Amino acid sequence: MRSITLRMSIALIGGAIAVLASPQPARANCYELIGCADKDYFKGSDLMQLGCQPLWEVRNTIYKENGYCFHTSKAIKAFGNAGCKYDDAGAVPLNAAERYNVKAIKKAEAKKGC
């Protein structure tokens, strides 16, 4: 009986490890002030409350989550290129909200002189 319980425990632990170690689908980041990048449409007034670095990070996180291959050393250091698929930012398959948000972020960055 004890060996059966031990084998069951080992099997359960092994299954739990496999689930935790398996790749998970990308999930869009959600931000307290501006919302979720993949479903909320960011407001320009909210974006203007962010500094240049957070704007850069949010914009590039959208690209990272959708498979963009970064080219600058700063972006590669921050995000890496593991699993990337697209060398051209224009080819990255963004949904409507993500496309809108990237444009809104770029507009805020330009207004702030980033």
Image (cartoon, helix red, strand yellow):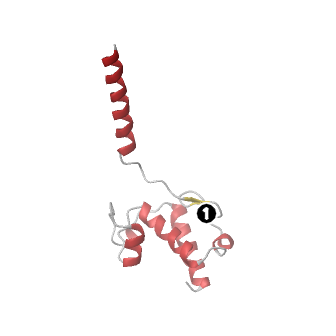
Residue 90 located left or right of residue 37: left
Q: Residues within 10 Å of mark 1 (few under 14, many from 20)?
A: some
Q: Quadrant of the C terminus?
A: bottom right
| Residue lying farthest to the top in this orientation | 1
| Residue lying farthest to the bottom in this orientation | 113
Q: Is residue 15 above or below residue 105?
A: above
Q: x and y percent of residue 83 in the render?
A: 32, 60
Q: x and y percent of residue 58 in the render?
A: 53, 68
Res. 70 in view: yes
Q: x and y percent of residue 70 in the render?
A: 37, 72
* Residue occupying image coordinates x 38% and y 39%: 19
Q: Is residue 24 above or below residue 51?
A: above
* Residue occupying image coordinates x 38% and y 62%: 67
| Residue lying farthest to the front in this orientation | 2
Q: Quadrant of the N terminus?
A: top left
* Residue occupied by mark 1: 41
The answer to which of 112 and 76 lies nearer the viewer is: 76
The answer to which of 36 and 7 lies nearer the viewer is: 7
Task: Find residue 2 and report its image quarter.
Answer: top left
Res. 89 in view: no
Q: Secondary structure at mark 1?
A: loop
Residue type pointed to by label 1: Tyr
| Residue lying farthest to the right in this orientation | 45
Task: Find residue 42 and report its image quarter.
Answer: bottom right
Q: x and y percent of residue 113 in the render?
A: 58, 86
* Residue occupying image coordinates x 51% and y 66%: 99
